[in-house]
Image (tube, helix red, strand yellow):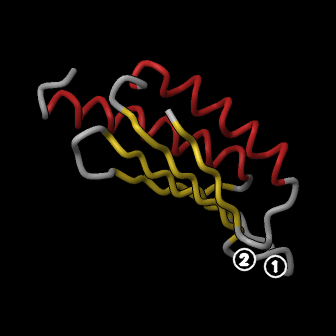
Amino acid sequence: MQIQVNTDKNISGREALAQSIEDVLRSDLSRFSDHITRIEVHLSDEDSSAKSGMTDKRCLLEVRLAGEHPIAISEQAETIEEAVADASQQMVNLLETELVKHGKW
């Protein structure tokens, strides 16, 4: 399961953050690893560092399943970590639904 983390220019601590995100996703999505070929994570600060907002950190999570179209989920939260955790949990639910629907689960 390959994981690629992409950030916008407003996100700092990219190396440590990327490792932390990979750890969360590998933990949460490990039971689907036989079906997942690639995960792309896109992180952004919607309001940038010049402004602050309650839910301005965004995580777009795209999972590519073997032999299927990619599926994506987007979550916003106060922190990147919360946005990733929320997106990851939503992806677990979506993967369960998709794999059952296609008879792979």
| Tag 1 and tag 2, C-beta contact below 8 Å | yes
**Image location (x, y in percent) of residue 19:** 75, 38
**Image location (x, y in percent) of residue 11:** 79, 63
Three-letter code for the amino acid on which mark 2 is drawn = Asp
Three-letter code for the amino acid on which mark 1 is drawn = Lys
Looking at the rendering, in which quadrant would you find the C terminus? top left
- Looking at the rendered structure, the number of numbered marks drawn on it comes to 2
Crowding around mark 2 (Cα neighbors within 10 Å: few <14, some 14 to 19, many 20+) is: some
> Which residue is labeled 2 in the image?
47
Tell me, for residue 51, which label it has, or none.
1
Image side of residue 48 versus residue 61, left or right: right
Q: Residue at x 12, y 26 (%)?
A: 103
Q: Residue at x 58, y 23 (%)?
A: 27
**Image location (x, y in percent) of residue 72:** 39, 53
Q: How far, Cα to Cα, is label 1 from label 2?
A: 5 Å
Query: Which quarter of the figure has residue 85?
Result: top right
**Image location (x, y in percent) of residue 31:** 42, 18
Q: Nearer the viewer, residue 15 or 28?
A: 15
Q: Is residue 48 above or below residue 33?
A: below
Q: Regarding mark 1 in the picture, which secondary structure is present there?
A: loop
Tell me, for residue 18, which label it has, or none.
none
Q: Residue at x 13, y 33 (%)?
A: 102
Q: Regarding mark 2 in the picture, which secondary structure is present there?
A: loop
Crowding around mark 1 (Cα neighbors within 10 Å: few <14, some 14 to 19, many 20+) is: few
Image side of residue 19 versus residue 41, left or right: right
Q: Nearer the viewer, residue 82 or 100?
A: 100
Q: Is residue 54 above or below residue 70?
A: below
Q: Is residue 84 above or below residue 28?
A: below
Query: Which quarter of the figure has residue 49?
Result: bottom right
Q: Residue at x 81, y 54 (%)?
A: 14
Q: Nearer the viewer, residue 81 or 15?
A: 15
